[in-house]
């Protein structure tokens, strides 16, 4: 009986490319999760994408629920995004000088995200969170930062502590090369556990500059905040004079048009953004109220710079993407399709008698192979059966559906995933769940 534990020989071109890549790129990939360590087998090398589909180097077509790990909320190669990038490129790809496009995208972000009055663009989510921490320390004059187990905020040294996601997939506790000195001011609390946060404030009442949190966990799978958790973080920061940082690199424009802060009605002091605001091009941003952001050079003393920050290609793609998202009915359609997908997969698992737990917030979702209630922390997530997920992953690949190659990553839907695409996904899930049940 087929168990989907490994890819079939039909992925020979990907294998050749992977062998070639490993000779010149560490592990053959430029980001660890792409190596498929979480599911085994050879990573698929992708040749192109269009709408909800991608094609690998061997010519296989897949319905894509990774979507470049979230940015492609309109689908692959959306015509308006492609046209915007082409127009920008024809005028010049980068100037190292201000452009009108930076202003327009900043103005749009300010209109959409409740807490934001000023924006500084950077080139990645890691740059954004690293800069946000520096800003929090500059504003408060304090050294320590609280983060949470299972929350990933990029690969800056100070934040690569119990970081979930790719680190968890690879089984690394932290990372060699990260010194004690760079993490000694990083305090770790339990996600969705206010008491663990209160204990840290009790111990360091005058030393904590801020709390950084994914308002919806997205790097241990999708783990929503329990009622009162985000509100409690806001209250603790207010009480102790610390700043609250929402890492919305993933959740921004993915769980709500105004981000998680609009969905849960909790305003942070600093917001980090990425992914969707670049429409599939490299981008990041940190943002907040004017009184905080004016600590950033050249207005203030906190220094941060970047040669390609705010480059015209990323700004153009981001503007095109956000303009479409704001059109009437677009967001409601996205959420309805995400609900249709997760309900269909859940019913397929139930019909087959395969225990799974699903989580979803807006257009982000996860499928955990586990019994019981939905996870609320990293400890809960670690109970999931990664081997079962790996068999599920390869089973769906054989059915022409591409999910994240790790139990600990989120799935995403796009505007291009219409009823037919979702129905085909659900039908594929029904077949795979039945085979997993009988294996």
Image (cartoon, rainbow, N blue to C red):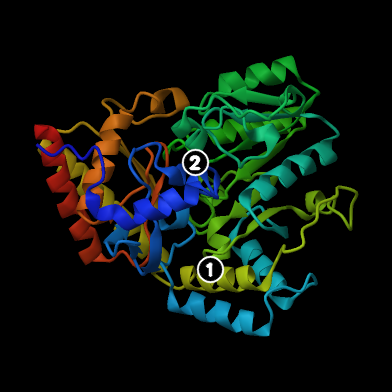
Please name the residue shown 42% across and 38% down the image: 221
Q: Secondary structure at mark 2?
A: loop
Label 2 to label 1: alpha-carbon separation = 21 Å
Residue 362 appears in the rendering:
no
Image coords of residue 172 (percent x, y):
52, 27
User: Residue under circle 2?
Assistant: 216
Instruction: Give the number of the disc on residue 79.
Output: none
Image coords of residue 296 (percent x, y):
83, 52
The one of 10 and 240 positioned closer to us in this rendering: 10
Query: Is 17 on the left or on the right of 125, as rendered?
Result: left
Query: Is 208 on the left or on the right of 272, as rendered?
Result: right
Image coords of residue 162 (percent x, y):
56, 27
The one of 425 and 89 positioned closer to us in this rendering: 89
Q: Secondary structure at mark 1?
A: helix
User: Residue under circle 1?
Assistant: 322
Image coords of residue 209 (percent x, y):
76, 32
Density class for disc 2 (Cα within 10 Å; few <14, some 14-19, many ≥20) is: many
Please name the residue shown 67% across and 73% down the image: 312
**CB under 8 Å between discs 2 and 1:** no
Quadrant for the C terminus in the image: top left
Please name the residue shown 42% across and 41% down the image: 409
Density class for disc 1 (Cα within 10 Å; few <14, some 14-19, many ≥20) is: many
Query: Is 18 on the left or on the right of 88, as rendered?
Result: left
Query: Is 283 on the left or on the right of 386, as rendered?
Result: right
Residue 425 appears in the rendering:
yes
């Amino acid at each position: 009986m087929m168990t989907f534990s490994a890819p079939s020989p039909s992925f020979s071109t990907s294998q050749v490319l992977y062998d070639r890549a490993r000779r010149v790129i560490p592990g053959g990939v430029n980001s660890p999760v792409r190596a498929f360590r979480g599911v085994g087998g050879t990573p698929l090398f992708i040749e192109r994408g269009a709408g909800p589909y991608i094609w690998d180097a061997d010519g296989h077509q897949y319905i894509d629920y990774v979507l470049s790990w979230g940015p492609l909320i309109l689908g692959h190669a959306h015509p308006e995004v492609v046209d915007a990038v082409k127009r920008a490129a024809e005028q010049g790809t980068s100037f190292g000088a201000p452009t009108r496009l930076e202003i327009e995208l900043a103005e749009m972000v300010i209109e959409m995200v409740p807490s934001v009055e000023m924006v500084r663009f950077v080139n990645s989510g890691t740059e954004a969170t690293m800069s946000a921490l520096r800003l929090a320390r500059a504003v408060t004059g304090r050294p320590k930062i609280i983060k949470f187990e299972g929350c990933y905020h990029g690969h800056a040294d100070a934040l690569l502590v119990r970081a979930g996601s790719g680190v968890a997939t690879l089984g690394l506790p932290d990372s060699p090369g990260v010194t004690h000195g760079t993490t000694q001011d990083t305090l770790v609390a339990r996600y969705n556990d206010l008491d663990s946060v209160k204990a840290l404030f009790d111990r360091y009442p005058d030393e904590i500059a801020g709390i950084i949190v994914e308002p919806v966990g997205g790097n241990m799978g999708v783990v929503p905040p329990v009622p009162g958790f985000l509100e409690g973080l806001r209250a603790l920061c207010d009480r102790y004079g610390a700043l609250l940082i929402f890492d919305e690199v993933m959740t921004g424009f993915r769980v709500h048009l105004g981000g998680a802060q609009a969905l849960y009605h909790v305003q942070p002091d600093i917001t980090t953004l990425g992914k969707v605001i670049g429409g599939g091009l490299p981008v990041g941003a940190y943002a907040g109220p004017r009184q905080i952001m004016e600590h950033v050079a050249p207005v203030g003393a906190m220094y941060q710079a970047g040669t390609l920050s705010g480059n015209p290609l990323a700004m153009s793609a981001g503007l095109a993407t956000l303009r479409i998202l704001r059109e009437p009915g677009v967001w409601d359609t996205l959420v309805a399709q995400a609900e249709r997908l997760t309900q269909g997969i859940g019913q397929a698992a139930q019909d087959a008698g395969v225990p799974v737990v699903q989580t979803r917030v807006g257009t982000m979702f996860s499928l955990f192979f586990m019994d019981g209630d939905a996870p609320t922390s990293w400890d809960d997530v670690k109970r999931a059966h990664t081997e079962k997920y790996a068999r599920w992953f390869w089973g769906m690949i054989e059915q022409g559906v591409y999910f994240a190659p790790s139990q600990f990553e989120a799935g995403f839907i796009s505007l291009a995933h219409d009823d037919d695409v979702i129905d085909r996904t659900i039908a594929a899930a029904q077949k795979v769940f039945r085979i997993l049940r009988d294996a």
